[in-house]
Amino acid sequence: NFIIENLSLTPFELVKLPGFEFTVTGISYDHSDLANPQGIVFPSQNYNTEGNLWKGFFFKNLSVKFPAKLQANTTISATNMLFDGKGFSGTISAPNVFGPDKGEMGSRKWPFSMQNLLIRFEANDLKEGKFDGKIRIPISKEDYYLNYMANISYVNELKYQFVIMPAQNVEFPAFIAKANLSPETHIVVEDMGNGFEASFHLFGSITLDTKLGGNLNGYDMSFQGITVQNL
């Protein structure tokens, strides 16, 4: 019966979270029937049914480096994860990961932010993955960002699903117009292997608010399925 404290481990990745590099310090190895490591936190209330008989590794302090294709040079801290006979379990959460001055989506480098990140593993399964933020499409004003939400899932491969939350009165200087986006508006983010490429599919209506040719002031028209990508 023994507990070994303050072990270290070479950086590693999880099979179901490829590209995210974990660096761990302050590892405790529990091989005791009499006690658990001090300060251990289990992933859910009913996870440990063995009490002091539980055995495994407790990771007290971790840093998680993001894949370059999502956002290079971004690292966040995490705590209280473990590895045992069931697999890897733990939660990564961060209220503010990076602002729009740091995020660059795809080869066109669309500015975006990331916040409210939550990634939860239990027994090697990705139970929950999500984040949200703001993203600017090139045809909008430079200081105007659209809100988005994103889910992370794993079914044979890691997938990101982005959902845009349309706003009213989006100004499109390229069209000299204002637009109302409908709920069908969405983002498609494709993993190209070495990076993500984003495209918007716009649905809604446009109001031309500047005279064109002297007779189109305030003219309304609708649009469906306009794709914004290579800008």
Image (tube, rainbow, N blue to C red):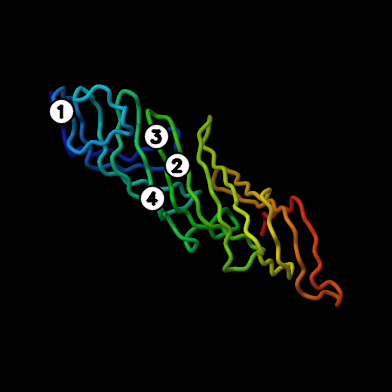
Q: Amino acid at mark 3?
A: Phe
Q: In the depicted view, which residue is nearer to us: 122 or 194?
A: 122
- Closer to viewer: mark 4 or mark 2: 4
Disc 4 packing (10 Å; few <14; some 14–19; many ≥20): some
Q: Amino acid at mark 2?
A: Gly
Mark 4 or mark 2: name the one nearer the start of the chain.
2
In the image: residue 114, left or right of residue 196: left
Q: Amino acid at mark 1?
A: Ala
Secondary structure, mark 3, is strand
Q: Which residue is mark 3?
A: 121
**Residue drawn where x is 48% and y is 44% of the image:** 130
Compared with 25, 127 (above or below) is above
Whole-number angstrom distance, CA of label 3 to CA of label 4: 15 Å
Q: Which residue is mark 4?
A: 94
**Residue drawn where x is 47% and y is 52% of the image:** 71
Q: Most extreme residue toward the bottom, as rendered? A: 214
- Closer to viewer: mark 1 or mark 2: 1
Mark 3 or mark 1: name the one nearer the start of the chain.
1
Mark 1 or mark 2: name the one nearer the start of the chain.
2
Disc 3, disc 2: CB below 8 Å? no
Q: Quadrant of residue 87?
A: top left
| Image location of residue 131, percent across then percent down | 48, 48
Whole-number angstrom distance, CA of label 3 to CA of label 2: 16 Å
Whole-number angstrom distance, CA of label 4 to CA of label 2: 18 Å
Q: Which residue is mark 2?
A: 19
Mark 3 or mark 4: name the one nearer the start of the chain.
4
Secondary structure, mark 2, is strand
Q: Which residue is mark 1?
A: 35
Compared with 155, 33 (above or below) is above
